[in-house]
Amino acid sequence: MAKVDTHKVMQQAERSCADHGVRLTSKRKHILEVLLNAQAPRSAYEIAELYRQKTEENIPVMSVYRMLDFLMQNSLVHKLASNNKFIACAHIACSHSHQTPQFLICDNCQQVREIGVDKQLIHALEESIEHNHFQLNSPQLELHGLCETCQQES
Amino acid sequence: MAKVDTHKVMQQAERSCADHGVRLTSKRKHILEVLLNAQAPRSAYEIAELYRQKTEENIPVMSVYRMLDFLMQNSLVHKLASNNKFIACAHIACSHSHQTPQFLICDNCQQVREIGVDKQLIHALEESIEHNHFQLNSPQLELHGLCETCQQES
DNA sequence: ATTGAAATGATATGATATATCATAATTTGT
DNA sequence: ACAAATTATGATATATCATATCATTTCAAT
Ligand SMILES: [Zn+2]
Ligand SMILES: [Zn+2]
Ligand SMILES: [Zn+2]
Ligand SMILES: [Zn+2]
């Protein structure tokens, strides 16, 4: 949730969608912008409300869910299962393709840091999985705790 | 979700609660038993229904949530954030104290395997966390995929 | 312009979770 | 054994999260 150059990110998002032959409509763009400007993950209902404030237009929550689905399929948005909220991908403007995401979620200020999962960690995960004869399916790690700032406050 | 000796597990659960000076009431025991006998994680509402079938007594969902909270605080039950369902801890009857749990969740048959997180994996996690100046707070890993059985079927 | 596909709207409903105040059961101190 | 304090549970309402379904609009291709 660090500062992002929204404009640049949106350009990259448009490019990415064009490359994949999917349509980043104006409403979908608004949803993504709302999340890029948010300081923490938001629920679908919060997003609908922020959309209204931003555009002065009403949007059905049903539509928000659908647009979030679209954005998630295209790795522009992630859903945090541990709190049922959505967050813009932190790596949209990065050149590399999207990797397994790892989220560090601060239980005090709610800010989230998305990092790529470290090589060694991936390896350890794979070992563990293999040892249990399990076949992994797009993992995503969500870790709760305290961010640096909130540690200092306590 | 492998076969468990429910009776033995319940004895150990009672002992553990006694040791910690908390009360494993008869209703709480029923809830735990329901989960021990379930073949997959269950929602609070499903648990309420199973409780009714088992005891022929009605139980308010509100109470189920409270009892689940109690059981979770005492590491007898875990909540899977990724599907909002609850599962009995697979290690109640183990002598060792409860470690960081890792869940392998089959997206086909819904069965869940709870394993202790491997040493190497823990180490890699800690490295990753430390590198980001984050302070972890009772982690829990949930990994989705296919169990061995379901892999063979496909 | 016609037409088929994709996106969005409208409406209803289901599923999950919490807040709050009341009552019952259990523990503790005497 | 009793009263007081604490803990557990019930009852009720409501908040929050998510999906199903059918109608309408928008867009792209011919
Ligand atoms: Zn991402
Ligand atoms: Zn913080
Ligand atoms: Zn466990
Ligand atoms: Zn399976």
Image (cartoon, coloured by chain):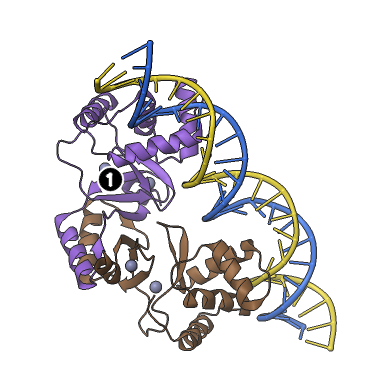
Chain colours: A purple, B brown, C blue, D yellow
Foreground: A138 or D19? D19
Q: Is residue A66 above or below residue A107?
A: above
What residue appears at the point 23 percent right and 31 percent down from the top-left corner? A21
Callout 1 crowding tier (Cα within 10 Å): few <14, some 14–19, many ≥20: many
Q: Nearer the viewer, residue A98 or B141?
A: A98
In the image, residue A117 lies at what x, y percent?
A: 21, 52
Circle 1 SS class: strand
The residue type indicated by label 1 comes to Glu
| In the image, residue A28 above or below residue B68 | above
| In the displayed structure image, the side of residue D6 where residue A125 appears, left or right | left
- Split into quadrants, the picture shows ligand 4 in the one at bottom left
Protein chain holding label 1:
A
User: Within 8 Å of ligand 1, the CB of disc 1?
Assistant: yes
Q: Position of residue A63 (x, y in %)?
A: 45, 33
Give the residue number, with chain letter if any, for mark 1.
A114
Residue at point 37%, 85% (across, down): B95
Q: Is residue A39 something one can see in this rendering?
A: no
The residue lying at 43 percent from left, 50 percent from top is A83
Check the picture and name the quadrant holding the N terminus of chain B: bottom left
